[in-house]
Image (tube, grey):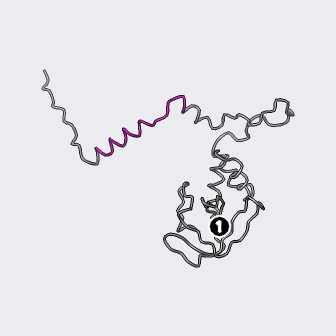
């Protein structure tokens, strides 16, 4: 006959209550197991333009077997290839990797003009809302080349910042 111990509930602090509420909300959006299987199969290769009678020496599966190898490949690609992948592989993991590499090379995506810009020199004017100066931009519509734009006003409002790089302080 052991004495019963009183179970003591932890005190509910406002922080704990807020954290619990956020955890419950996040659990409402967890993917189903079947969805996870589809998404996690990054390397389940299905060719977009399947042609059954290709030459037997052509590869039938991707060359890379893990994500680290793909990332390492994108780190070695030339700028033109990164731009090509960004504009012609839209909505893919490859587009994400190309954008990430372009940002590493100090390119910034302008959401209004839907093109990449890079500082040619330090901006002549810099405020909290914009900076103005000479920029190099990638002309994907008429020349597939880099052009210089003088006295360009780059408003931070149009800076794509989804990959986590900040706009105003980047060079």
Residue 74 spot, x, y in % from top left? 68, 52
Q: How many marks?
A: 1
Query: Is 14 positioned to the left or the right of 119 in the image?
Result: left
Quarter occupied by the C terminus: bottom right
Residue 41 spot, x, y in % from top left? 61, 34
User: Label 1: which residue?
Assistant: 118
Farthest residue, direction bottom: 124
Residue at image coords 69%, 35%: 45
Quarter occupied by the N terminus: top left
Residue 49 spot, x, y in % from top left? 77, 36
Q: Which residues are magenta?
A: 17-35
Residue 19 falls inside the magenta stretch: yes
Is the residue marked by circle 1 packed among few (<14), some (14-19), or many (20+) residues within 10 Å?
many
Residue 34 falls inside the magenta stretch: yes
Q: Say what secondary structure mark 1 lies in.
A: strand
Q: Quadrant for residue 64, please give it.
A: top right
Residue 22 spot, x, y in % from top left? 36, 43
What type of secondary structure mainly makes up the magenta span?
helix
87 vs 2: above or below: below
Farthest residue, direction right: 55
Query: Is 118 positioned to the left or the right of 144 in the image?
Result: left
83 vs 33: above or below: below
Residue at image coords 33%, 41%: 21
129 vs 86: above or below: below
Residue at image coords 14%, 26%: 4
Q: Quadrant for residue 146, please give it.
A: bottom right
Viewer-proximal residue among 80 and 41: 80
């Amino acid at each position: 006959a052991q004495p019963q111990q009183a179970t003591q509930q932890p005190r509910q602090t406002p922080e704990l209550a807020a954290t619990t509420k956020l955890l419950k909300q996040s659990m409402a959006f967890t993917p189903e197991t079947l969805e996870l299987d589809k998404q996690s199969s990054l390397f389940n290769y299905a060719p977009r333009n399947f042609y059954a009678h290709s030459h037997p020496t052509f590869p039938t599966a991707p060359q890379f077997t893990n994500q680290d190898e793909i990332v390492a490949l994108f780190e070695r690609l030339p700028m033109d290839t990164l731009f090509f992948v960004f504009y012609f592989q839209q909505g893919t993991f490859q587009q994400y990797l190309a954008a990430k590499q372009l940002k590493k090379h100090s390119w910034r995506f302008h959401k209004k003009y839907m093109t990449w810009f890079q500082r040619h020199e330090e901006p002549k004017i810099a405020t909290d809302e914009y900076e103005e100066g000479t920029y190099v931009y990638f002309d994907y519509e008429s020349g597939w080349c880099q052009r210089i734009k003088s006295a360009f006003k780059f408003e931070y409002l149009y800076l794509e910042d989804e990959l986590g790089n900040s706009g105003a302080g980047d060079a």
